[in-house]
Structures are given as structure tokens and as C-alpha cells.
Image (cartoon, rainbow, N blue to C red):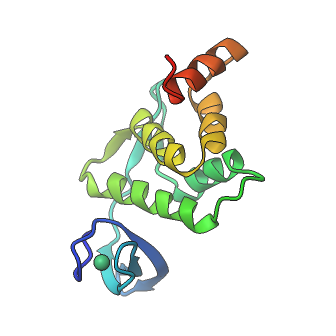
Amino acid sequence: MKCPHCDHKRSRVIDTRESGDGIRRRRQCTSCSQRFTTYEQINTAVHIVKTDGRREPFDRIKLLNGMRVASAKRAIPVARLEGLADQIEEHVYGSGRAEIASSIVGNMVLDGLKQIDPVAYIRFATVYMDLRDLESVRAELDRLMGRA
Ligand SMILES: [Zn+2]
């Protein structure tokens, strides 16, 4: 969703409300801070396909909760996590596909968290990438720190 004022690609949703058969979102550009409104038609749910083949509807709240757990006790503004969730949600619904692999969503969370907070990133990676032992956590840390 490009900002109509400066063409910047990222915006933050500051208000969401139902409007007729769609959703009206008030957005604020993360670059120029100008506000604009978008209208979305309710779409059929996009399903997330897990690695074991199970499907479940994309759930923004669940996504955000996963990020919150990984960010516990870190000084990360909630708005940054919500911004990341918005970005991922936009990608999921904007893809025009009925199904999307959980690995795509997981990688988007990892990429986003990596830029927000390294500890939250490692915590999320530990669960999501199923790093079962200290060795694999260290390997990921080394990779993150450019030592591998
Ligand atoms: Zn802008």
C-alpha cells in the first residue's frame, strides 16, 4: 500500500473499523507521517499451510502473540511489532493466493525481528526454526553476527 503523498511503501494502521461490507483503515505513512484511508473488501480467508500439511486460516492475533512472546521484557514498542504484523498481513492478503506456506510467513517474521531486536529474533528463531540444542542456537548466532 503506497503512501499517496510520498509513495513510501510502509504505513501503520492507526484505526480499523467496519464500513458496509468492507473494512476502513486509517493509515499513517512511516516516512512522511501523513495519514490516508484505505478500504478493503472482506476476502475469503487466506490459509497458512504448515510443513506437516495442515492448513489453518491466517490469524493476525496469533502472529502478533508469537512476536510478543519472543519480545517479552525487551524494550520494543508494541507499535513496531504491530507494524511488522501489518506488513505481513498485507503481504499475505496482497498475494492474491488462497494458500501460503507457513515458512514464508515465518521468514518474514524472522527478517522483521532481526531488524527490530536481536534477542527477540533469536528467541523466535529458537522456537520457529526448532533449534533444539545450544549448538544450533550458537550456529545461528554466529550466522547472525556474520562469523559463520
Ligand atoms: Zn508518505
> Where in the figure is residue 13, as x and y percent of width and height?
45, 75
> Where in the figure is residue 71, as x and y percent of width and height?
68, 50
Q: Residue at x 45, y 27 (%)?
A: 53
Which image quarter has ligand 1? Answer: bottom left
> Where in the figure is residue 38, as x and y percent of width and height?
31, 80
Q: Is residue 16 left or right of residue 20?
A: right
Q: Residue at x 57, y 68 (%)?
A: 79
Q: Is residue 146 left or right of residue 132?
A: left
In the figure, 118 relative to 51: above or below? below
* Residue at the top extreme of this rendering: 135
Q: Is residue 83 in sight in this rendering?
A: yes
Q: Is residue 134 left or right of residue 16?
A: right
Quarter of the figure with residue 42: bottom left
Depth order, front residue of 66/125 = 125
Number of labels in the image equals 0
Q: Is residue 133 in sight in this rendering?
A: no
Q: Quadrant of the N terminus?
A: bottom left
Quarter of the figure with residue 101: top left
* Residue at the right extreme of this rendering: 73
Depth order, front residue of 89/126 = 126
* Residue at the front extreme of this rendering: 147
Quarter of the figure with residue 70: top right
> Where in the figure is residue 134, as x and y percent of width and height?
71, 16
In the figure, 77 relative to 41: above or below? above
Q: Residue at x 56, y 21 (%)?
A: 142
